[in-house]
Image (cartoon, rainbow, N blue to C red):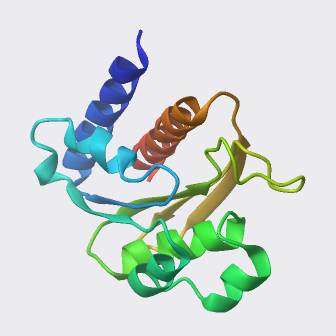
Amino acid sequence: MTVATDTFALASHLGALLLRRRWTVATAESCTGGLVAGAITDVAGSSGWFERGFVTYSNEAKMEMLGVSERTLAVHGAVSEATAREMVTGALRNGTATLAVAVTGIAGPGGGTPTKPVGLVWLAWGHRDGAIAARAEQLAGDRAAIRVATVRIALEGLVERASAG
């Protein structure tokens, strides 16, 4: 199975789950630059379950569009659990979606540090009921591979939550 087929299958499955529950989803993306939203909207009929997407590449955009606090960015940085949690909270607050996912990371090839190497990605998933889960992934490969893997992980987490919730 190719990566494109894999993400399309995941997005299609997500859509079926969301439609069954009458839920919608939103995305808040940094390092993926809208690729999660793109994978979702590759599915015909996704307008019935995709509410909106935020591409917040800069810190200013994270603050303005999602309400990520300047303090969080100063203390923890853009690539952190705290920022991912605030991003997913902002996506839910600034829309009507039932579920949301946020991704922030270092796709490379530059930008990494010893404590935050290239390939470090933080993801957070949130539900309108207030439940938020976050986790870090250390992904391997070049920029494209890191971004594609992040999309897959984001979709898998949404499917998991739509299946359980």
Residue at 33% over, 18% down? 5
Indicate left or right for 42 with 147 as reference: left
Q: Is residue 64 visible?
A: yes
Q: Find residue 24 and report its image quarter.
A: bottom left
**Percent position of residue 147, x then y:** 52, 39
What count of labels does the image hold?
0
Residue at 31% over, 36% down? 11
Direction right: furthest residue: 114
Q: Quadrant of the C terminus?
A: bottom left
Position above or below: 109 against 116:
above
Position above or below: 72 against 121:
below
Indicate left or right for 50 with 132 as reference: left
Q: Is residue 130 visible?
A: no
Q: Quadrant of the N terminus?
A: top left
Direction front: furthest residue: 110
Residue at 30% over, 27% down? 8
**Percent position of residue 112, x then y:** 76, 51
Position above or below: 89 against 63:
above
Nearer the observer, 113 or 71: 113
**Percent position of residue 55, x then y:** 38, 63
Q: Find residue 90 and report its image quarter.
A: bottom left
**Percent position of residue 119, x then y:** 69, 42
Residue at 49% over, 77% down? 62
Nearer the observer, 36 or 85: 36
